[in-house]
Amino acid sequence: MAHVAQGQQEVPDNLRKQLAVAVRSVQWSYAIFWSQSTRQQGGENTISKIKTLQHIPQQQIKVEDQGFAAAVDSVMTQVLEWGDGYYNGDIKTRKVEAMELKPDKIGLQRSEDLRELYKSLLGGETDLQAKSSSPVLSPEDLSDEEWYYLVCMSFVFNPGEGLPGRALTNKQPIWLCNAQYADSKVFSRSLLAKVGFLFNFCFAFKTNFS
């Protein structure tokens, strides 16, 4: 199945700093904000046709395509995907410049570097060093906890799926103990959590970002 992202909830620039304050106050390893977005699902030909019809005035759509156009909404789905996050766990390799940062800035810089590494791995970029003023991490620089945090960036949850999806659907907070032993149907990242994450807490809330 192919997926086309249509629109993602806007994330404020200072969200990571807000997450940092919350995480450091309770000494947790990380925090992730899962953002709602709308996607279209279907085969490549289906998506290509949908994208074409979306740019044609309604009155100009052929009769045989009207039913198809009306079915567009049926392949639209709301999902939760990575919005932003803050990492506060073990750090395997510190860059020289990062060592010169104040303690409250180290986590913010590391979170940014991990995000940039994920983007580089996702896009196959090889020359991010020239695009960033800070040293770019490489995979061998990461601790097990950092790998867990980085891989989480690739997860997408449907409503009712995983902890984020269930918290959103039920509008109830979920507290999971011994996450590394949880059934994968309950916690899809349980195998990754074996690096040492014992607890996971997930809750949904309405945002009014402007």
Image (cartoon, grey):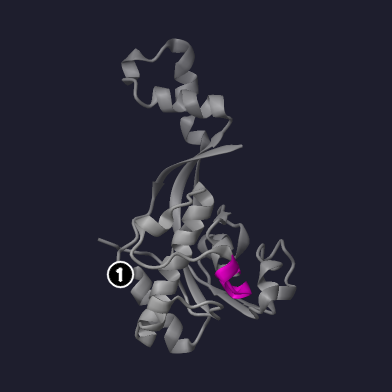
Q: Does the stretch in magenta take in 144?
A: yes
Q: Position of residue 28 (x, y in %)?
A: 52, 83
User: In the depicted view, which residue is nearer to us: 207 or 14?
Assistant: 14
Q: Quadrant of residue 18?
A: bottom left
Look at the picture and state if 116 lies above or below 200: above
Q: Quadrant of the C terminus?
A: bottom left
**What residue would you read off at disc 1?**
14
Q: In which quarter of the image is the N terminus?
A: top right
Q: Residue at x 41, y 82 (%)?
A: 99
Q: Position of residue 97 (x, y in %)?
A: 38, 77
Q: Residue at x 55, y 24 (%)?
A: 45
Q: Where is residue 169 in the image (x, y as percent from the top left)?
A: 53, 60
Taken as a whole, is the magenta stretch helix, strand or loop?
Answer: helix
Give the side of residue 140 with respect to residue 12, left or right.
right
Q: Quadrant of residue 208?
A: bottom left
Q: Is residue 34 visible?
A: no
Q: Does the stretch in magenta take in 117?
A: no
Q: Can residue 60 be seen in this view?
A: yes
Q: Which structural element holds mark 1?
A: loop
Badge 1: how crowded within 10 Å, few (<14), some, or many (20+)? Answer: few
Q: Which amino acid does label 1 sit on?
A: Asn
Q: Give the range drawn in magenta.
A: 140-147
User: In the depicted view, which residue is nearer to us: 52 or 124?
Assistant: 124
Q: Position of residue 127 (x, y in %)?
A: 44, 53
Look at the picture and state if 127 lies above or below 95: above
Q: Residue at x 59, y 57 (%)?
A: 160
User: In the depicted view, which residue is nearer to us: 135 or 29?
Assistant: 135
Look at the picture and state if 13 lies above or below 90: above
